[in-house]
Amino acid sequence: MKSNINLSQGDRHPVKSGNQFMKTNPKQIGSNSGKVLQDHLKRGSTFFLPLTCTATGPKWNLINWRSDFLPELVWLAQFVSDVGYERANELACTLAITTKTIATTCGDFGTISGYSILTDDLKTSICDQLQKTGVWDIIARSLTPILRLYPACPLGFLSAGKPLAISETEAAEKLAPIIAQCLIRRETLPMLAQGIYYNILLATGRLSVSQPLNTAALKDYPITAESQEVGGFVRTTATGLGVCRISDEWPKYFWRHGLEIGQCVLEERDDGQIHGISEDFLRYHMCCFKRYNDRCNELWNTINRTYPFDLYSPLRDEVLLALVCRIYRVTIQIASFIANWTQDMSETYVRMVVESYIYYQWLSKKGSPKDFAEFYEHGLGQQKLQSEHLKVFLDAAGLTIEEAQAQNAGLDFLRKHKMPEFIRVNLGNPLGKNLNQIATEVDELAPELACKNLHSLVYSRASSAVHGMYDSLEMFYMKQCFNPFHGGHRIPYYWSKSAVTSYGFSNCLGLTDSVLADVVKSIGGKLPEIMPGELFMVELGNSDEFEDFKKSTRCKSS
């Protein structure tokens, strides 16, 4: 049977308010072309782009814009938001030049932390000078939201000890959208702030160039080519901030104090999630599933009645049919319970099915008696290893040999096969090659099975979900906080985050159809016109049948 792989995670169910399912449209994936990561360098088990790697490993330290840079430049973004880019540039440069002149030091006065080195006398002198030049009022007024919300801000001296004419609520309303825009470095507002920072470096002598950038072009960022080019140079210059800064005290305070500015805010969106599925559809699904189960039972009955077991050497038959049974049983688990149709659960189930499917196809097509024996021995070795671990644990707990053996069920399992002393433990793959190699060898014999694609596009991508790596933790078990003052952090989300999709169960159903058809055909049995899994999907997606079902059940209940 030709293999169809459904890669769509966007095929969500239900898709309409009436909880009608739409049909799955599996995509037939062609053979892989080219070598994955062929433009990367491999160092140990890690791949790098040549630009980022030397012979010994990584050569770049990545910056953290959100944590370290945003708090330092947020005052410039506040200026821009309040008085516009050109006026903001004038005010910020005036403040920086005044501070450098009075402090007689070459501090980084384009950052908030740069002002933390000032003594009280210097702060007073700076405010006096700004008042003389007539810009103190507007500078202090523009920065009021920051000064109100962050009492320990190094720029707090600009209020000159006068009461801040704004409430915390008003300050939060003004500053929140500014921080929200600045969380993404390449947005227009943070780009303008970085442009002003570049100009401050020039104005205070911390940066010297033969031909200064036309930062006025940033007003058109990112629309024009010139603004994009200038933006690239500005970002490069601003990146040096992390190297030159004197302390990380202010950035740490900025984010930690942000926790006191409002509660976490979660996006109120649950499109397609499990709790949105109607009771009508849950009942309809169970009726469809019962029919699926009955149709599969007919195929299994055919197999059990007519399969020609080799009773002299039954290992091959046992292994192959048990793999088919495992594929079917896992599919039953995911197909029977809609809560398993969420992406995180789906990937766990579909990975189990794909692994057994690839083993089944390899063993059925090229497995020798020795390969089946190795597969068998590997399983016994796993039981022996488990038994030995348990033995050590029970011995340490003070149990006698007899007591330990009585609780070690693995020993009984092993003794039914071999004396435990003669069982070897293989910690590697049972066939001496990894699953990717096995899938490749299957495709060499039967390209239409697309086992290599199943491995790379379904099995491998499910690895993170199965092992709980960070990407799967973020996608499935965390939600982003939308309070800008919290910096876009993520919090645990213990209910179902991912929507119900057809991805996992449709692939499981398709692979189960494939192996059941393979076994039935091998014994000369008759296959139905449409295999049970495919028909199950058709019935689930039949909106007319679903509507008829709802009407009939309501009539019965009334």
Image: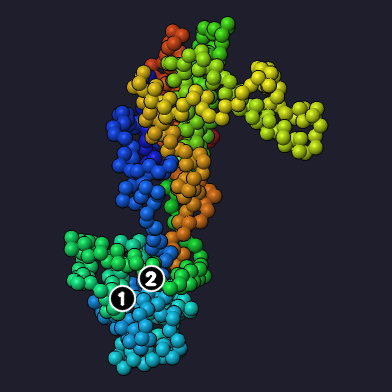
Residue 244 at least partly seen: yes
Separation of residues labelled 2 and 1 (CA atoms)? 10 Å
Q: Quadrant of residue 243?
A: bottom left
Callout 1 environment at 10 Å: few (<14), some (14 to 19), or many (20+)? few
What residue is drawn where x is 34% and y is 65%? 239
What residue is drawn where x is 29% and y is 63%? 236
Give coordinates of residue 417: x percent, y percent: 65, 17
Name the amino acid, label 1. Arg
Closer to us: 29 or 10: 29
Quadrant where the image shows the N terminus? top left
Secondary structure of the residue carrying numbered label 1? loop
Q: Quadrant of residue 76?
A: bottom left
Closer to us: 193 or 5: 193
Name the amino acid, label 2. Cys
Q: Which residue is mark 1?
A: 206
Q: Quadrant of residue 485?
A: bottom left
First-in-chain label (2 vs 1): 1
Residue 446, above or below 56: above
Residue 99, above or below 557: below
Give coordinates of residue 95: x percent, y percent: 33, 83
In the picture, measured across the screen, residue 494 lies left or right of residue 480, that is right
In the current view of this chain or complex, which residue is farthest to the front? 55
Please say if the residues under marks 2 and 1 sit with CB atoms less than 8 Å apart.
Answer: yes
Name the disc covering residue 244, or none. Answer: 2
Closer to us: 112 or 448: 112
Residue 419, above or below 495: above
Give coordinates of residue 439: x percent, y percent: 41, 26
What residue is drawn where x is 34% and y is 84%? 100
Name the disc covering residue 506, or none. Answer: none
What residue is drawn where x is 18% and y is 60%? 225
Closer to us: 523 or 336: 523
Give coordinates of residue 30: x percent, y percent: 30, 29
